[in-house]
Image (spheres, coloured by chain):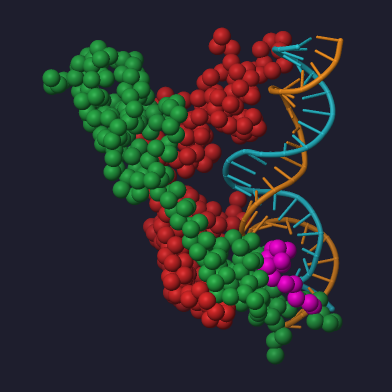
Chain colours: A red, B green, C cyan, D orange
Amino acid sequence: MAAGLTIGRAAREAGVGVETIRFYERQRLVAQPPKPQGTGVRLYPTDTVERIRFIKKAQELGFSLREIQELLALRSDPAAGCADVRDRATAKLEDVRRKIQHLQNISGMLEQLIAACLGSGGLQACAIMDALSRHDADDMACCSASGRGSDASLKDVAFRIENLPCGDCASAIKEVLEKEPGVKAVSFDKGETRILYDLRTIDKERLAAAIESSGFRIAGHQ
Amino acid sequence: MAAGLTIGRAAREAGVGVETIRFYERQRLVAQPPKPQGTGVRLYPTDTVERIRFIKKAQELGFSLREIQELLALRSDPAAGCADVRDRATAKLEDVRRKIQHLQNISGMLEQLIAACLGSGGLQACAIMDALSRHDADDMACCSASGRGSDASLKDVAFRIENLPCGDCASAIKEVLEKEPGVKAVSFDKGETRILYDLRTIDKERLAAAIESSGFRIAGHQ
DNA sequence: GTGGAGTCCGTACCTAGGTACGGGATCAAG
DNA sequence: CTTGATCCCGTACCTAGGTACGGACTCCAC
């Protein structure tokens, strides 16, 4: 009886909800099986259940559905090798480590603030409120130092990068950008990434492409 | 002189976009100032700029806009004390630490998989794909609670199996091994069978015994 | 007085990963 | 043959934190 399972049973087998399977179908993560002739109910092969379990496990490893789609494509690509998978995993590990670093920065700051706070008294004596209200530019905005040059062929542009939470991530993007020819300086200010570049060598689109190829998103781009 | 700033200038001062200020207004995080009589443009007091900076700093500490709303409410509550703020910060620290722990689990799992993956050969020999495709009930969360020293209890070993002529036999042996408790990954590369296992659960001798009980011979064993 | 920059306001859209609703069809048990 | 459970399918909604668009004003400088 290898005919298959109804969607409800398949969902139970795979440990997800019915709606989730339908959602994955819409996302083209799993194929929608046909209804056997004469019936009105689709039957899912155990293959699909396997596939859903694969998706769930990959999610636990931090992969997004889009990335999982790639992994699944690799899986059915005869030309794909172990190295392809490994590369994906390594990139994801990088990604996760960056996130950890970011959270550790936050954790450290919170610890310091909590330690500095007496925990009693009014708000005007509260170190935490104080740090948040204070007018200084320090805190976490680590960088600055934008040179003020005026050269005819130098131009600067500011991108607003969506997923750039902290200084460490900013350093990563800075490295990438500075490898591009024509990039003279990269700085971060008020939520914007400013790039000073030589317009004879490179243009805005290529800069944007470099940023996006590192996994960052630019607000309002594309 | 200036009774306030236009929204554009206020945005620049605060380091956000104009749309962001409008968004915060809709979210009731900042008040919408009136238009001075006779004019058509709203003027923002520097207070609002301060408030936006507060919001941004609190965001950098990991607070959500909803939580920031509470912090702001505290700030203008005469009955609120330092302890209230401290409690919020402590709760957030907890929260952040939990997230770090979660990411560290993921990181540990990825490290193990990458270590177990030879990075060459086809996908059928890929430890990573394998772990994702395997359908054992214990999910990927096998490596939790062991902190950062990811490989504390995991060890890998390589056997050279003499009568392992083809991929199908390799699959067979893999199945056998994966039924053993404590076996995390099995991969094949360059004539060797590599096994990643939990040394608290199983040891090399039991792995060897499992292989030999399936009719395979291990080179240089016994 | 004109052009361009900025503002106002409402609304729609975006990411990710689903969840929920509703009306109609179908299926299995009693 | 009915009843209750499922299934089908399209569509809307949810969270969070904004971003974008577009038409109509308004403001400032030249």
Residue drawn at the location 28% of the way across and 40% of the way down: B153
Q: In the rendered image of this protein, does residue D30 appear above or below residue A11? A: below
Region in magenta: B21-35
B29 within the magenta span: yes
| A158 part of magenta stretch | no
Task: Please name the residue shown 55% across and 11% down the image.
Answer: A2
Out of B143 and A76, give the one closest to the viewer: B143
Q: Position of residue A187 (x, y in %)?
A: 46, 68
Tell me residue A161's x, y (percent): 54, 59
In the picture, measured across the screen, residue B190 lies left or right of residue B55, that is left
Residue D19, above or below B48:
above
Residue A183 falls in which quadrant of the image? bottom left
At 64% from the left and 66% from the top, the residue drawn is B70
Magenta span: predominant SS is loop
User: Where's residue C26, x and y in %?
Assistant: 75, 15
Tell me the quadrant of the picture where the N terminus of chain A can be found.
top right
What residue is shown at x 66% (from left), y 19% (from top)? A42
Question: Residue A116: which quarter of the image?
Answer: bottom left
Residue B101, percent from left and from top: 43, 51
Say whether residue A122 is visible.
yes
